[in-house]
Image: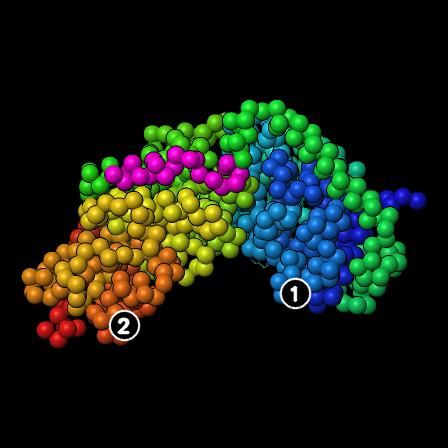
Amino acid sequence: MSPDFKDLTNAVRFLSIDAVQKAKSGHPGMPMGMADVATVLFKYYLRFSPKNPSWINRDRFVLSAGHGSMLLYSLLYLTGYKSISIKDIQNFRQLNSICAGHPEYEKNTGIETTTGPLGQGLSNAVGMAIAEEIMKKKFGSSVINHKTYVIASDGDFMEGISHEVMSLAGHLKLKNLIVFFDNNKISIDGSTNLSVSDNYKKRFESYGWSFQEVNGHNEKQIFNAIKKSLNSKKPNLISCKTIIGYGSPNKSGKASSHGAPLGEEEVELVRKKLKWNHKPFEIPKEIIKEWRKIGEKGVGYEKKWNNIFNKKSSKMKEEISRIINNKLPNNFNKIIEDQKKKLFEEKSSIASRQSSANVLETITKSLPELIGGSADLSGSNNTKTKHSVIIKPSNFTGNYIHYGVREHGMAGIMNGMALHGGIIPYGGTFLIFLDYCKPSLRLSALMGLKVIYIFSHDSIGLGEDGPTHQPIEHLAHLRAIPNLNVFRPADTIETLECWEIALKSSTNPSVIALSRQKIPFVTETLTNKNMSALGGYELKKTNSNPEITLIASGSEVEIAIDALNKLKQNNINSKVVSMPCQELFDKQPREYREKVIEKNSKKISIEASSIFGWEKYVDSDGTSLGLKSFGKSAPYKSIYENFNLTSDSVVMIAKKILGK
Ligand SMILES: Cc1ncc(C[n+]2csc(CCOP(=O)(O)OP(=O)(O)O)c2C)c(N)n1
């Protein structure tokens, strides 16, 4: 007898619970509860290709309830992805196993993204759905026409980010987004009645979503709901009433099945109840065969798509291949080179946020994959240029997204666009509001995504808006995140260079911190070399044996140069090091670093920010100028004076250190 629907779903359930049991850790309840929904999706609807997990027009599948990762691994193994073997499943949650607890993202494996921090997957999926619409508009619906499916749990919808992104998805009418809500009414602390009384139907409908509710264990109902959603004009929420830990006599419907192995005895009871007479990790051949048949359908989907794609113009094919493979256009270096020359001739003293806008103005036309936006601060972040075209509901011709006041959503959506491929997202807000989007920014770094964060108003230099708006600890915080470049450029040339590096960094995100206030042009010599790529470099010195090295970033390079001139008048030789990116400087060879930060000199660092972290450059007999408290509300020059961030203070400190 050929395997039936129950056999298919039970294969998913038992692989999941046996892996969790073997690892003695993990979350069996969700895979047991959602096995039916996932099986209907993979069996009847999902267009995917295990033989080519990166096929550009595949449907995306996001497991926002990432704790249920065994559900995904089981599905990938069963449908025939080479990336997941039965051994990998047996190694669930072990060192270096691809089957990690919360796998986030693994390129070319079928693991699109599953999020540990609840709510993130929803935001990624919204980003993927936007990316799909943008690319469809660009290349035509015969080439890009996929869906984005998500499984999300109670916890996902409790998180604030879910509100931000679902609201924007409704506004943009992302009809190709289909979210399955694992509505099992259980979270870790027990019943969701403890903390939620939302009327979900009203909630989702008020966002402009279509809402359906099904019994999440009824194949037909699930099938029909997905079918209906395929023709929807709105984003789709399918609330699936499920039983967590389905099949477990003593733990189903209870929080106890959520996040711990069921226990050997209970697993045996589940085997009896679901009539699964197979040993752990043993899936009968006929059932595997049936699952593999589902995976093999992908060859046909892809073949059909290739036939269409191959008939497209070579220009289009090359362009798609370029942006999918993260390659910049051939003329990109020339554009940067020419602009650098121009900037050097102009020597403009402008706010670095304005310099950033100028960079965007220069590159946007040649980089159609660059999709910008801001969380309602476009005019302040200078992220919108004359080449920006607004993306509107049901019209994705543009290259600029008004995210609204949704910093967290913006960052999660940018991750989703980067994960989708074919898009380089950049988005702006004030540096202070890093606090409102940091969880997603951390995931950009963890997943190694090319996402560019434009954080303007980067210090007390923003002035009168005062301490609530003045970032203090934020740069230190960002610099503590692995795999992230934090740039703070000092003038128009450095801003161009930092943008160039960010655009050429394929496996890490970048933050470009920008000043609100005007800053002078400080570059001394014109070179085609990207000096900011060294992280820090010698900008100016008064002789070859400086007694003092002044290390500064961004707007404080001006103070350092002023101090150098004043020190000279006091017969003290010094040098100024501009440090636009500590992460890149720290990667330079020791000889270079010791040459730039003169080993035998006394060091003073200057940054209008927390001094935390600068101690690595100034020895115990050096000093870091910065802030140890929150800022002040006043015109910016008086705030700088209030905190002794002036060239006179630098001179005084230098003299003191040198005993002069
Ligand atoms: C941002 C965030 N906070 C907390 C957690 C820890 N956590 C993991 S699952 C979960 C809630 C589980 O409830 P639900 O989302 O309904 O999943 P289910 O029990 O249905 O599997 C929590 C609080 C997390 N992963 N992310």
Q: Can residue 45 be found in the magenta stretch?
A: no
Instruction: Give the side of residue 546 with respect to residue 211, left or right.
Output: left
Residues in magenta, as a range: 322-341
Of helix, strand and loop, which mostly describes the magenta segment?
Answer: helix
Q: Nearer the viewer, residue 73 or 292?
A: 292
Q: Which residue is mark 1?
A: 94
Measure the alpha-carbon separation of dots 1 and 2.
42 Å
Amino acid type at image mark 1: Gln
Q: Can residue 333 be found in the magenta stretch?
A: yes
Q: Position of residue 263 (x, y in %)?
A: 76, 67
Q: Nearer the viewer, residue 111 or 469?
A: 111
When asked about the image quadrant of residue 398, the answer is: top left
Taking the spot 74% from the left edge, 42% from the top edge, the residue there is 295
Amino acid type at image mark 2: Asp
Pointer 1: residues within 10 angstroms few (<14), some, or many (20+)? some
Q: Position of residue 587 (x, y in %)?
A: 39, 60
N-term mark: 1 or 2 = 1
- The quarter of the picture where the N terminus appears is top right
Q: Which residue is mark 2?
A: 619
Q: Are the residues at dot 1 and dot 2 in contact (C-beta closer than 8 Å)? A: no
Pointer 2: residues within 10 angstroms few (<14), some, or many (20+)? some
- Asked if 308 appears above or below 281 in the picture, the reply is above
Residue 298 visible in image: yes
Instruction: Give the side of residue 591 with respect to residue 115, left or right.
Output: left
Q: Position of residue 288 (x, y in %)?
A: 81, 49
